[in-house]
Image (cartoon, rainbow, N blue to C red):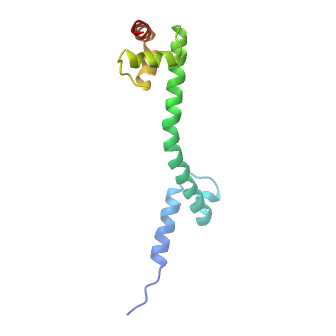
């Protein structure tokens, strides 16, 4: 039986790595060892940042809601507490969109929250 040499599989694996590092700079694109290291590190950062993106957007929404609430004379925590008490189920993303796109509607929501106390 003939001996099978690994050259085809190795070449395919290396070509795959170099294809995925397209757009990287310098040796991180051309040299297999640097490219492999850069690719694995990139995957780790991508995994981490998929989790972080959710946190960062929540922080952004809270900052926007807080600013809009202060403009209407109420603190963020009292607004959220009042929303829960008055059984208005709006998530932070939609609240921040309302605060940006239609401040008068946001002011109406704040008035409803004040009445709910």
Nearer-the-camera pick, 91 or 81:
81
**In the image, farthest residue toward the bottom:** 1
| Location of residue 106 in the rendering, given as x and y in whole percent from the top left corner | 43, 12
- Badge count: 0
Q: Is residue 55 visible?
A: yes
**In the drawing, does residue 40 fall left or right of residue 99?**
right
Report which quarter residue 116 is drawn in.
top left
Which residue: 53% across, 61% down? 18
Q: Nearer the viewer, residue 21 or 61?
A: 61
Q: Position of residue 111 (x, y in %)?
A: 42, 6
Where in the figure is residue 24, as x and y percent of width and height? 58, 52
Q: Is residue 80 left or right of residue 31?
A: left
Residue 85's quadrant in the figure?
Answer: top left
> Which residue occupies 61% across, 66% down?
33
Q: Residue at x 53, y 40 (%)?
A: 52
In percent of width and height, residue 78 lies at 49, 15
**Image height of 114 relative to 30, above or below:** above
Report the quarter where the N terminus lies: bottom left
Seen at 58% across and 55% down, the residue is 41
Q: Quadrant of the C terminus?
A: top left
**Which of the pair 77/65 is nearer the observer?**
77
User: In this rendering, does residue 100 appear at all?
Assistant: no
């Amino acid at each position: 039986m003939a001996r099978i040499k690994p050259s085809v599989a190795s070449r395919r694996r290396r070509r795959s790595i170099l294809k995925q590092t397209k757009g990287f700079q310098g040796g991180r694109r051309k040299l297999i060892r640097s490219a492999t290291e850069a690719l694995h590190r990139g995957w780790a950062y991508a995994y981490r940042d998929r989790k972080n993106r959710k946190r960062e957007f929540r922080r952004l929404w809270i900052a926007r809601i807080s600013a809009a609430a202060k403009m209407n004379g109420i603190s963020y925590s009292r607004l959220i507490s009042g929303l829960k008490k008055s059984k208005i189920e709006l998530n932070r993303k939609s609240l921040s969109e309302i605060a940006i796109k239609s401040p008068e509607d946001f002011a109406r929501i704040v008035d409803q929250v004040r009445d709910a106390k």
